[in-house]
Amino acid sequence: KQKLINYNVFCLVGDGDLMEGVAEEAASLAGNLALDNLIVLYDSNDITLDGPLALSNYDNIKMRFEACGWNVLTTDGTSVELMKKMILKLRSIL
């Protein structure tokens, strides 16, 4: 099978980004199309521009993306080396 796109696309998102309806629609579409070159790095710090995330959103983001057909890996994100290893692992899955 020949791939049309042979590189990875990275997105950096936060809690406020994934609260938007268009983010759910885009995640669902990417899952349905089985886009295998997209890596989303999500900073889950429980804060938005409006304040604490719990004031406006209770979604389980990991479960939401898994339901859309995504491979989801998690880490605390404090180690650059660990993040590098996870990105390399994701690239090998895709």
Image: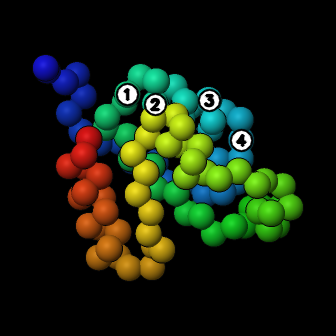
Identity of the residue drawn at 50% across and 43% down: 66
Q: Separation of disc 1 and disc 3 at Cα?
A: 14 Å
Helix, strand or loop at disc 3? helix
Residue type for callout 2? Gly
Q: Which residue is mark 3?
A: 25
Q: Position of residue 36 (x, y in %)?
A: 31, 34
Q: Quadrant of the C terminus?
A: top left
Q: Which mark is residue 4?
A: none
Identity of the residue drawn at 78% across and 53% down: 57
Dot 3 or dot 2: first in sequence order is: 3
- State if disc 1 and disc 2 touch (CB < 8 Å): yes
Residue type for callout 3? Glu
Q: Nearer the viewer, mark 4 or mark 1?
A: 1
Q: Which residue is mark 2?
A: 31
Dot 1 or dot 3: first in sequence order is: 3
Within-10-Å neighbours for mark 1: few <14, some 14–19, many 20+: some
Dot 4 or dot 1: first in sequence order is: 4
Helix, strand or loop at disc 1? loop
Residue type for callout 1? Ala
Q: Position of residue 12 (x, y in %)?
A: 49, 54
Q: Which mark is residue 20?
A: 4
Q: Which residue is mark 1?
A: 34
Q: Quadrant of the N terminus?
A: top left
In the image, residue 79 above or below residue 42: below
Within-10-Å neighbours for mark 2: few <14, some 14–19, many 20+: some
Residue 1 shows up from this direction: yes
Within-10-Å neighbours for mark 4: few <14, some 14–19, many 20+: few
Residue 51: quarter of image? bottom right
Q: Position of residue 53 (x, y in %)?
A: 77, 62
